[in-house]
Image (cartoon, rainbow, N blue to C red):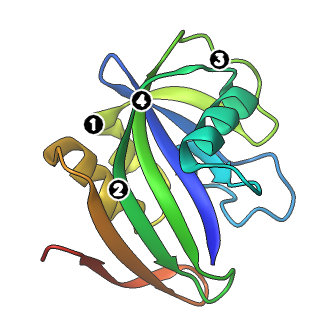
């Protein structure tokens, strides 16, 4: 199982979103997602998301908060355990990103973007819950969400 991190950086009612349009062979091609990536050997989830925020957006994260653990069952790409965070940042200016286009997007406009179906399940939880939740998302080949289960339901 791959270990990854994902962060939705908050600023003035917006989340920092990455439109994945630049990498070849990108399983997230065309989607809008938060920033994050794969954990390296001997790296904690917090070290990983801080490194990824600097690499992808040139940001130092502030008030980093673990919000959820996401279990993705992905037959096309292999299963993934993702540590989901929210945070603030040291600034709002965004540099060019080698993986796509970075943009501050008002939270209420995010549902209209091309997202993974599972993101449509967990993104509202960031707005309605204050605890750290565990969510299991199962996908069919081709990226269709087939089921999801919140651990406390």
Residue depicted at 69% across the width and 35% down the height: 51
Residue bearing mark 2: 68
Where residue 16 appears, as percent x and y from the top left, is 50, 31
Residue bearing mark 3: 94
Badge 1 density bin: few <14, some 14–19, many ≥20, Cα 10 Å: few
Q: Tag 3's secondary structure?
A: loop
Residue that lies at the very extreme toward the right in this rendered image: 24
Residue depicted at 68% across the width and 55% down the height: 39
Where residue 124 appears, as percent x and y from the top left, is 24, 51
> Does label 3 or label 4 sit earlier along the sequence?
4
Left or right, 97 with reference to 91: right
User: In the picture shown, does residue 9 fall above or below 91?
Assistant: below
Residue bearing mark 1: 108
Q: Tag 2's secondary structure?
A: strand
- Asked if the residue at tag 3 contacts the one at tag 1, i.e. Cβ–Cβ closer than 8 Å, the answer is no
Where residue 5 appears, as percent x and y from the top left, is 56, 52
Which marked residue is nearer to the observer: mark 1 or mark 2?
Answer: 2
| Residue 2 location, quadrant | bottom right
> Does label 1 or label 4 sit earlier along the sequence?
4
Residue depicted at 32% across the width and 70% down the height: 135
Checking the image for residue 87, the label placed there is 4
Badge 4 density bin: few <14, some 14–19, many ≥20, Cα 10 Å: some
């Amino acid at each position: 199982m791959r270990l990854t991190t994902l962060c939705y950086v908050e600023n003035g009612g917006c989340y920092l979103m990455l439109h994945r349009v630049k990498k070849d062979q990108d399983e997230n091609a065309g989607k809008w997602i938060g920033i994050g990536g794969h954990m390296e050997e001997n790296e904690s989830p917090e070290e990983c998301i801080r490194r990824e925020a600097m690499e992808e957006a040139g940001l130092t994260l502030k008030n980093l908060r673990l919000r959820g653990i996401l279990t993705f069952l992905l037959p096309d790409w292999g299963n993934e355990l993702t540590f989901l965070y929210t945070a603030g940042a040291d600034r709002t200016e965004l540099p060019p990103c080698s993986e796509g286009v970075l943009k501050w997007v008002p939270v209420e406009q995010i549902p209209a973007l091309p997202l993974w179906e599972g993101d449509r399940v967990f993104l509202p939880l960031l707005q309605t819950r204050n605890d750290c939740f565990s969510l299991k998302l199962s996908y069919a080949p081709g990226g269709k969400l087939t089921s999801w289960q919140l651990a406390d339901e």
